Image: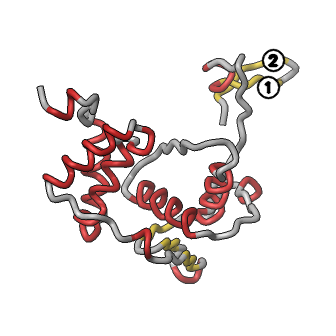
Amino acid sequence: QTVASTMGLKPLSTRQIARLARTMHSFPENAGKELREHVRSIMLAQFLPKAQQKMLDQIMDECKFEYDDHESTDIEINIKGANEDNIVKIGDIEMRVEPPTHPELVPSPLFFEIPSHKRVLRDILESLASGEKHLLLIGNQGVGKNKLADYMCELLGAEREYIQLHRDSTVGSVTLSPGLKNGLVVFEDSP
């Protein structure tokens, strides 16, 4: 029984450790200075009670995790076009992108680059560049989660389709969609 477990801090899962290792391996130059923030993100530290947040920070201090100074620096967003290898760069993270198959599905939102959103975009790009395929954005209504997702899709040339969920949504209604084929109703995999 550790002090952390008595305070309610759960250990990292194998999946969380693998994600952390994949990110650190993909960006070794940032590994030391960003490890603390990655652990805080994985542990959803901002949603923990204050006592657990303090315990987590004490544990990371004892392990000599460095503090990340990215909050104080402005992050630039650069896009190099088709004649320059289709590279998106946010801060110090770069990722090669492919042209979209269906450009009409790539969103083009009105987006104002504010420092906190650019930091989140950088973190999203870092996760995608290190091999993450699925991301979950958590936050209160109206903080810009859809805007961030749409803008990232625009930067990456990625198609986006909306699925409206409601209290009666089921796994089947999300994964299958009805359609007509030769006058018959058929259910096919959703996009």
Residue occupying image coordinates x 36% and y 44%: 42
Is disc 2 placed on a helix, strand or loop?
strand
Q: Nearer the viewer, residue 154 or 148?
A: 148
Q: Residue at x 34, y 56 (%)?
A: 37
Query: Looking at the image, is mark 2 or mark 1 earlier in the sequence?
Result: 1
Q: Nearer the viewer, residue 16 or 37?
A: 37
Residue 47 location (% of width, % of height) = 44, 39
Where, by quadrant of the figure, is residue 162 drawn? Answer: top right
Q: Which label was assigned to residue 185? A: 2
Q: Is residue 87 left or right of residue 141?
A: left
Q: Amino acid at mark 1?
A: Gly
Residue at left offset 72%, top offset 57%:
107
Above or below residue 20? Residue 80 is: below
Left or right: 13, with 116 as reference point: left
Residue tagged 1: 179
In-front residue for pair 89/73: 73
State if disc 1 and disc 2 touch (CB < 8 Å).
yes
Q: Is residue 77 above or below residue 167?
A: below
